[in-house]
Amino acid sequence: MFQFQFELESDLLAVLEKRPYHYARWMVILQRWEPTISPSFPSLIPFWIKVQGIPLHLWEEGTIKSIGEDIGIFETYEITPTSVRMRVQINGRLPLITSFVIEYSTGEEVTATLIYEKLEKHCSKCFQLDHEIKDCLAARAEKKPKEKE
């Protein structure tokens, strides 16, 4: 862990606004210091996340905000004629959520796919940010029974 000090609050805010950051294509958790002794601090990485698979007529603030609040700390959203995306602070120590089932009052369900912008190295098997699939324990465990057959 490192701690950076800024002379001006505006400089700190400018750095935080440009997150997420990477080093050698690995995600870096950069979070404002908090007076805590929690072993899970720091953990938050803000991502812009594209939401795909939702029918156009259901692109609305309530739906997007609900998804964002369920996967992390929802910040904001953008809806354009061609896309929907949201900015959410995700716990970078947990696996990424890549799909989300939306249940409507009519009983209908739609599965949304979540595409993380500026996402670099990560495991495509377990979706953790701290290793690649070649080092994934879950992938190795799944591979072992197949080798015995």
Image (cartoon, helix red, strand yellow):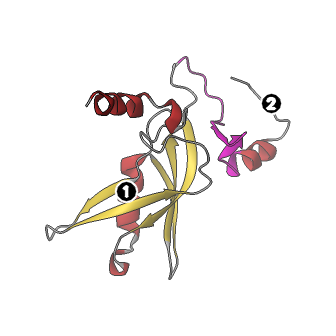
Question: Is 105 left or right of 94, judged from the image as shown?
Answer: left
Crowd rating for badge 2 (residues with CA inside 10 Å; few <14, some 14–19, many 20+):
few
Compare residues 35 and 18 and report the one nearer the observer.
18
Q: Quadrant of residue 148?
A: top left
Q: Quadrant of residue 112?
A: bottom left
Start and end of the magenta stretch? 16-37
The residue at 41%/52% (across/down) is 98
Please say whether residue 83 is visible from this viewpoint. yes
Q: Earlier in the sequence, mark 1 or mark 2?
A: 2
Residue position for label 1: 67
Q: What is the three-letter code of the residue carrying label 1? A: Ile
Residue found at the far left of this picture: 107
* Predominant secondary structure, magenta span: loop
Q: Are marks 1 and 2 in contact (CB under 8 Å)?
A: no
Please say whether residue 92 is visible from this viewpoint. no
The residue at 56%/21% (across/down) is 36
Q: What is the three-letter code of the residue carrying label 2? A: Gln
The residue at 60%/22% (across/down) is 35
User: x, y percentage for residue 34?
Assistant: 61, 28
Residue found at the far right of this picture: 7
Above or below, comparing residue 144 to residue 104 in the picture:
above
Compare residues 104 and 9 and report the one nearer the observer.
104
Frontmost of labels 1 and 2 is: 1
- Could you give the CA–CA distance between mark 1 and mark 2, rounded to whole angstroms? 34 Å
Residue position for label 2: 5
Question: Is 89 left or right of 143, judged from the image as shown?
Answer: right
Of helix, strand and loop, which one carries label 1?
Answer: helix
The C terminus is located in which quarter? top left
User: x, y percentage for residue 142?
Assistant: 33, 33
The residue at 41%/68% (across/down) is 61
